Image (cartoon, rainbow, N blue to C red):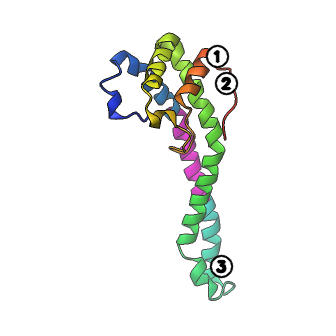
């Protein structure tokens, strides 16, 4: 959850509960997926690097190109590209999970309390809160308006903007 310091004096402690709860639920969903993505990235990089090293040092198949192909830069680039691809795969699902987390927290703390908090944040007119169409932390976070609509509709918002 990213909220500016300017929110500290404006929101009451009770209003922070739904925001923190929703963030904790989303983070608990994200953490295993980050670990899976890292493991897949490492495995893909090793799947490239180990055979290249064996061919470069065990035989003369690669010849002088072996010096370049055994550079650690290649597996790093391959691993990073794999992470980017997995980030794009998880992005729409993470967006939906953030909206589902809001619904779960609303069930615990009360939908009206959560809606009031979101409306209060929305009414402040902060440009950085209104324009959440940027990529942040690997997925497009739902905007305040989208979160309000999701809570009002009881989770009937199924479309995820790309």
**Which quadrant of the rendered structure holds the C terminus?**
top right
The disc placed on residue 55 is 3
Q: Residues within 10 Å of mark 1 (few under 14, many from 20)?
A: few
Spatial separation of the CA atoms under disc 2 and disc 1: 7 Å
- Main SS, magenta region, reads helix
Q: Which residue is mark 2?
A: 157
Number of marks present in the image shown: 3
Q: Residue 54 in the image: x percent, y percent? A: 62, 76
> Which of 38 and 57 lies nearest the eye of the viewer?
38
Image quarter of residue 56: bottom right
Could you say whether the residue bearing mark 3 is in a helix, strand or loop? helix
Q: Which residues are magenta?
A: 28-43
Q: Residues within 10 Å of mark 2 (few under 14, many from 20)?
A: some
Spatial separation of the CA atoms under disc 3 and disc 2: 53 Å
Answer left or right for 90 relative to 113. Answer: right
**Which quadrant of the rendered structure holds the N terminus?**
top left
The disc placed on residue 153 is 1
Which residue corresponds to the image point at 64% horizontal and 67% vertical from the top-left?
48
Which residue corresponds to the image point at 48% horizontal and 21% vertical from the top-left?
118
Answer left or right for 5 relative to 132. Answer: left
Residue 3 vs 41, above or below: the answer is: above
Residue 74 vs 152, above or below: the answer is: below
């Amino acid at each position: 959850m990213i909220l500016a310091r300017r929110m500290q004096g404006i929101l009451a402690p009770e209003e922070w509960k739904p925001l923190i709860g929703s963030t904790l639920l989303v983070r608990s969903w994200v953490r295993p997926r980050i670990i899976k993505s890292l493991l897949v990235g490492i495995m893909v990089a090793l799947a490239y690097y180990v055979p290249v090293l064996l061919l470069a040092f065990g035989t003369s198949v690669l010849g002088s190109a072996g010096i370049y192909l055994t550079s650690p830069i290649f597996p790093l680039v391959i691993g990073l590209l794999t992470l980017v691809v997995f980030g794009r795969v998880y992005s729409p699902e993470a967006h939906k999970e953030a909206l589902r987390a809001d619904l779960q927290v609303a069930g615990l703390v009360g939908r009206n309390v959560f809606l009031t908090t979101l409306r209060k944040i929305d009414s402040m007119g902060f440009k950085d809160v209104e324009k959440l169409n940027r990529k942040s932390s690997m997925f497009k976070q739902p905007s305040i308006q989208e979160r309000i609509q999701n809570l009002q509709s009881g989770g009937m918002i199924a479309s995820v903007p790309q």
